[in-house]
Amino acid sequence: MRYLVVFFLLYAMPFNLLAQPEVVDWTITVQSEVSGDITLILEGKIQDGWYVYSQNLGSTDGPIATELVFNEAETLQLVGETAESGTKVEGYDKVFGMDIAKYKETIVLTQKIKLPEGLDKLSAYVTFMSCNDEVCLPPRDFEFEVNLN
Protein backbone atom coordinates (compact mmCIF):
# COMPACT_ATOMS: atom_id res chain seq x y z
CA MET A 1 0.00 0.00 0.00
CA ARG A 2 2.81 2.39 0.84
CA TYR A 3 4.28 1.88 -2.63
CA LEU A 4 0.95 2.78 -4.22
CA VAL A 5 0.85 6.09 -2.31
CA VAL A 6 4.45 6.88 -3.29
CA PHE A 7 3.65 6.03 -6.93
CA PHE A 8 0.69 8.41 -6.89
CA LEU A 9 2.68 11.24 -5.32
CA LEU A 10 5.63 10.88 -7.67
CA TYR A 11 3.95 10.01 -10.95
CA ALA A 12 0.23 10.62 -11.13
CA MET A 13 0.07 13.91 -9.24
CA PRO A 14 2.52 15.90 -11.45
CA PHE A 15 0.55 14.96 -14.58
CA ASN A 16 -2.66 16.08 -12.90
CA LEU A 17 -1.08 19.45 -12.06
CA LEU A 18 0.03 19.90 -15.67
CA ALA A 19 -3.57 19.39 -16.80
CA GLN A 20 -4.83 22.43 -14.88
CA PRO A 21 -7.14 24.55 -17.05
CA GLU A 22 -6.26 28.06 -18.18
CA VAL A 23 -9.08 30.09 -16.67
CA VAL A 24 -7.75 33.61 -17.34
CA ASP A 25 -6.87 35.01 -20.77
CA TRP A 26 -4.62 38.10 -20.44
CA THR A 27 -4.24 40.94 -22.95
CA ILE A 28 -1.78 43.83 -22.70
CA THR A 29 -2.20 47.40 -23.93
CA VAL A 30 0.43 50.15 -23.73
CA GLN A 31 -0.73 53.76 -23.98
CA SER A 32 1.98 56.33 -24.67
CA GLU A 33 1.60 59.78 -23.16
CA VAL A 34 2.90 63.14 -24.41
CA SER A 35 5.17 63.35 -21.34
CA GLY A 36 6.99 60.18 -22.45
CA ASP A 37 5.38 58.13 -19.70
CA ILE A 38 3.34 55.06 -20.51
CA THR A 39 0.28 53.48 -19.03
CA LEU A 40 0.34 49.70 -18.97
CA ILE A 41 -3.08 48.02 -18.96
CA LEU A 42 -3.49 44.28 -18.36
CA GLU A 43 -6.95 42.86 -18.82
CA GLY A 44 -7.75 39.37 -17.65
CA LYS A 45 -10.87 37.72 -19.09
CA ILE A 46 -11.96 35.17 -16.49
CA GLN A 47 -13.91 32.04 -17.44
CA ASP A 48 -17.45 31.69 -16.13
CA GLY A 49 -17.61 30.32 -12.60
CA TRP A 50 -14.01 31.31 -11.74
CA TYR A 51 -12.59 34.20 -9.74
CA VAL A 52 -9.27 36.02 -9.43
CA TYR A 53 -8.42 37.61 -6.11
CA SER A 54 -7.73 41.30 -5.52
CA GLN A 55 -4.30 42.81 -4.89
CA ASN A 56 -5.66 44.12 -1.60
CA LEU A 57 -6.85 41.27 0.57
CA GLY A 58 -5.99 42.68 3.99
CA SER A 59 -4.74 39.31 5.25
CA THR A 60 -2.30 36.59 4.26
CA ASP A 61 -4.51 33.92 5.83
CA GLY A 62 -6.55 33.35 2.67
CA PRO A 63 -5.79 33.22 -1.04
CA ILE A 64 -2.71 34.62 -2.77
CA ALA A 65 -3.21 38.26 -3.74
CA THR A 66 -2.77 39.31 -7.36
CA GLU A 67 0.55 41.10 -7.90
CA LEU A 68 2.13 42.90 -10.87
CA VAL A 69 5.95 42.62 -10.78
CA PHE A 70 8.37 44.39 -13.14
CA ASN A 71 11.69 42.72 -13.96
CA GLU A 72 13.28 46.15 -14.50
CA ALA A 73 11.93 47.45 -11.17
CA GLU A 74 15.22 49.09 -10.17
CA THR A 75 15.29 51.23 -13.35
CA LEU A 76 11.58 52.09 -13.60
CA GLN A 77 9.73 54.79 -11.75
CA LEU A 78 6.19 53.66 -11.07
CA VAL A 79 3.73 56.53 -10.81
CA GLY A 80 1.35 55.61 -8.00
CA GLU A 81 0.07 52.16 -7.10
CA THR A 82 -1.24 49.58 -9.55
CA ALA A 83 -4.96 50.29 -9.90
CA GLU A 84 -7.44 47.45 -10.30
CA SER A 85 -10.93 47.42 -11.71
CA GLY A 86 -13.38 45.01 -13.29
CA THR A 87 -16.35 42.99 -12.13
CA LYS A 88 -15.61 43.06 -8.41
CA VAL A 89 -17.33 40.79 -5.90
CA GLU A 90 -16.87 41.52 -2.21
CA GLY A 91 -18.10 39.51 0.71
CA TYR A 92 -17.88 36.13 2.35
CA ASP A 93 -15.88 33.52 0.41
CA LYS A 94 -16.94 30.01 1.41
CA VAL A 95 -13.73 28.42 0.07
CA PHE A 96 -11.59 30.44 2.51
CA GLY A 97 -14.21 31.16 5.17
CA MET A 98 -13.55 34.89 5.25
CA ASP A 99 -14.57 38.20 3.70
CA ILE A 100 -12.62 38.81 0.51
CA ALA A 101 -12.51 40.97 -2.64
CA LYS A 102 -12.31 39.05 -5.89
CA TYR A 103 -13.12 39.52 -9.56
CA LYS A 104 -15.33 37.54 -11.91
CA GLU A 105 -15.56 37.99 -15.70
CA THR A 106 -12.77 40.62 -15.88
CA ILE A 107 -9.92 42.06 -13.86
CA VAL A 108 -8.01 45.08 -15.16
CA LEU A 109 -4.64 46.17 -13.74
CA THR A 110 -3.42 49.66 -14.70
CA GLN A 111 0.02 51.08 -13.93
CA LYS A 112 1.51 54.39 -15.06
CA ILE A 113 5.27 54.23 -15.58
CA LYS A 114 7.96 56.86 -16.07
CA LEU A 115 10.47 55.17 -18.38
CA PRO A 116 14.23 55.70 -18.20
CA GLU A 117 16.12 56.80 -21.32
CA GLY A 118 17.01 54.00 -23.72
CA LEU A 119 14.68 51.31 -22.40
CA ASP A 120 13.25 49.53 -25.45
CA LYS A 121 11.58 46.53 -23.77
CA LEU A 122 9.57 46.09 -20.63
CA SER A 123 9.18 42.65 -19.06
CA ALA A 124 6.99 41.76 -16.15
CA TYR A 125 4.63 39.14 -14.76
CA VAL A 126 1.32 38.95 -12.98
CA THR A 127 1.01 36.44 -10.15
CA PHE A 128 -2.60 35.46 -9.57
CA MET A 129 -4.70 32.76 -7.98
CA SER A 130 -7.99 31.53 -9.41
CA CYS A 131 -10.74 29.59 -7.69
CA ASN A 132 -14.30 28.53 -8.36
CA ASP A 133 -16.84 27.70 -5.66
CA GLU A 134 -15.27 24.28 -5.00
CA VAL A 135 -11.56 24.28 -5.83
CA CYS A 136 -8.56 26.59 -6.22
CA LEU A 137 -5.77 26.29 -8.74
CA PRO A 138 -2.20 26.89 -7.59
CA PRO A 139 -0.98 30.48 -8.05
CA ARG A 140 0.29 31.17 -11.57
CA ASP A 141 2.56 33.69 -13.22
CA PHE A 142 1.59 35.24 -16.54
CA GLU A 143 4.86 36.51 -17.98
CA PHE A 144 4.95 39.10 -20.73
CA GLU A 145 7.24 41.45 -22.58
CA VAL A 146 6.32 44.57 -24.53
CA ASN A 147 8.40 46.49 -27.07
CA LEU A 148 8.46 50.20 -26.36
CA ASN A 149 9.72 51.39 -29.76
Image (cartoon, rainbow, N blue to C red):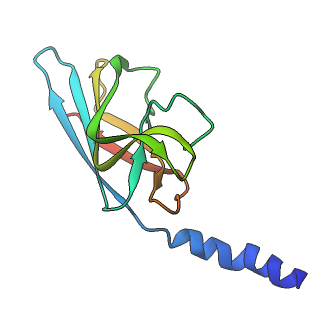
What quarter of the picture does the N terminus occupy? Answer: bottom right
Residue at 82 percent across and 84 percent down: it is: 4
Q: Position of residue 109 (x, y in %)?
A: 30, 35
Q: Residue furthest left?
A: 34
Q: Return the residue nearer the eye: 92 or 135.
A: 92
Q: Is residue 50 visible?
A: yes
Q: Return the residue nearer the eye: 139 or 77.
A: 139
Q: Is residue 64 visible?
A: no
Q: Residue furthest right?
A: 2
Residue at 52 percent across and 28 percent down: it is: 58
The image quadrant of residue 81 is: top left
Judge whether 140 appears above or below 6 on screen. above
Q: Position of residue 82 (x, y in %)?
A: 35, 26
Q: Position of residue 116 (x, y in %)?
A: 31, 18
What quarter of the picture does the C terminus occupy? Answer: top left
The image quadrant of residue 123 is: top left
Would residue 47 appear left or right of 2 to someone viewing this image? left
Would residue 49 appear left or right of 38 to someone viewing this image? right
Q: Return the residue nearer the eye: 90 or 6.
A: 90
How many discs mark residues in the rendered view?
Answer: 0
Residue at 54 percent across and 53 percent down: it is: 95
Residue at 52 percent across and 59 percent down: it is: 137
Would residue 106 appear left or right of 97 to someone viewing this image? left
Q: Position of residue 47 (x, y in %)?
A: 31, 61
Judge whether 140 appears above or below 67 on screen. below
